[in-house]
Image (cartoon, grey):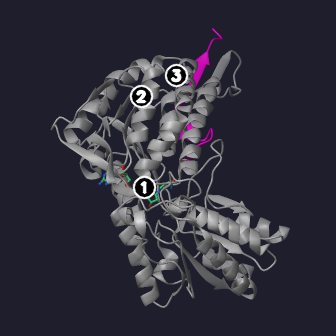
Amino acid sequence: MRTYQNFIGGDWVPALSGKTAQTRNPADVREIVAEYAASDAADALAAVAAAERAAPAWADATAVARGRVLSKAAQLIEARKAELAELLTREEGKTLAEATGEVQRAADIFRFYGGISYTLGGRTIPHDLPGNLLYTVRRPLGVVGLITPWNFPVAIPAWKMAPALVAGNAVVLKPSGLAPALSLEVARALADAGLPAGVLNVVLGEGRAVGNAIATHSAVVALSFTGSHTVGHAIYQQLAKRMARAQMEMGGKNPTIVLADADLDLAATLVIRAGFGLTGQACTATSRVIVEKSVAAAFTEKLLAKARALKVGNGLTAGIDMGPAVSESQLLGNLKWVESAVAGGAQLLCGGHRLTSGELAQGWFMEPTVLGDVTPAMPIACEEVFGPVVVVIAAENFDDALRIANGVNVGLSASLVTRDFKNALRYTERIEAGVVKVNQISTGLALQAPFGGVKQSSTDSFKEQGVEALDFYTRTKTVYLDYSA
Ligand code: NAD
């Protein structure tokens, strides 16, 4: 069992109350993975104070100097990739291959923003008068708060921390209590890479106590949140009260449309990967397949064969395709969704049950689940489940499929499988989603490209990732300089 403290002002410190909490392996709950400081508001206040003290000097360092710290941290994370990936699998449950990819992604994110530091300039604008300079500079905001979920416990903290830090901000991070280990290991890497004390602070603890203290603190001038709608909406209102900058990234109900001309084997493979990869616990997971009626039966048959063939088990075991749900409540929530969908008229085509044979009884395992006869108005077709549950909805044609896809109040990622160039382009134009994919899985993002949702999936004023992420973490200052006299 590992032991982690809060990381505040460059020191590893216990919660002021002395309280601790533990995480358990969702694949085998007999195993305690780590023990943590169980913080409350007082610890969050200490973290914000440390960030306030460290912010001015970090803002005054050159962007290139800041970038060097990030690049070095990338090397340190990469050097420990195997160890960190195993820890991630033990704590969150995803397969070792998925965890290894995520740790590599975190290293790449730090490397990317380390390099970006060389380009962190502004714009020169022609002035109307001679002897005058007109240009913009990017300035850091000050202290920013980051609140992150459990499902990508290293990639999401990394894709918020890296642009925040390279832009010159001081950070207070509150990771999810369900899987905080990796964000603390990233903090360790940054400290070892030379990040000055107090520039990054990590506070562990229950969401309401710690997250609320960060979100309502007047010194926290901007907050980037990823998580559920309920929490995101509540935090957004807190930030709006004092006009703090807000970036709320929340859930989706991501469609994959399968048209009659599609390669149905490809379509089934893409839906399996996007629906059941990461145990369906990805914000961009395909949870709705909208299929043209004429091929619905043939497609569904292929989908079911592939879903039944998936191997569910401990993500550390070789050959496992899908790990457990992260927690008992997540598992029970998934099962309840299936039960109520069936009660509401959906047909259970495969899965739908908890897995309890042998060692699986020790964890939060569930069968990959496919529901048919689902109509667009059913709650299971509109609301996020966040588990390995895919619904199949039949559509008359492309336009009907598009209407169904757009008929929800969220819009994060959306995919289309077709060979028809015209429909592919129409889809990219008309689908209401922040990310559109054609003949690709709805999950999986390039770190160098902007990411974010539309509608209720996101506040949608700033994107994450790519060079665009810097817009949230900087403010533009316009400089007028007269040297004519
Ligand atoms: P959650 O909203 O329960 O928790 C997210 C974070 O908020 C955690 O750190 C939690 O401790 C904290 N928190 C909880 N209550 C709080 C409060 N009152 N004040 C401040 N902070 C509080 O979400 P989760 O279960 O950890 O994550 C799953 C959700 O995240 C899903 O809805 C998923 O779609 C979404 N998600 C979105 C994206 C995206 O980029 N759009 C990416 C990954 C996950």
Q: Is residue 468 magenta?
A: yes
Q: Is residue 397 magenta?
A: no
Q: Nearer the viewer, mark 2 or mark 3?
A: 2
Would residue 281 be found to the left or right of residue 466 on screen? left
Within 10 Å of the Cα at label 1, are there few (<14), some (14-19), or many (20+) other Cα atoms?
Answer: some
Quarter of the figure that contains the N terminus? top left
Within 10 Å of the Cα at label 3, are there few (<14), some (14-19), or many (20+) other Cα atoms?
Answer: many
The residue carrying mark 2 is 188
Mark 1 sits near ligand 1, with its Cβ under 8 Å away: yes
Quarter of the figure that contains the C terminus? top right
Q: Nearer the viewer, residue 109 or 297?
A: 297
Would residue 24 be found to the left or right of residue 376 on screen? left
Tell me which numbered mark, 2 or 3, is placed earlier along the sequence.
Answer: 3
Within 10 Å of the Cα at label 2, are there few (<14), some (14-19), or many (20+) other Cα atoms?
Answer: some
The residue carrying mark 1 is 227
Q: Which mark is residue 69?
A: 3
User: What is the secondary structure assignment of the residue under circle 1?
Assistant: loop
In this picture, which residue range is highlighted in magenta?
463-485
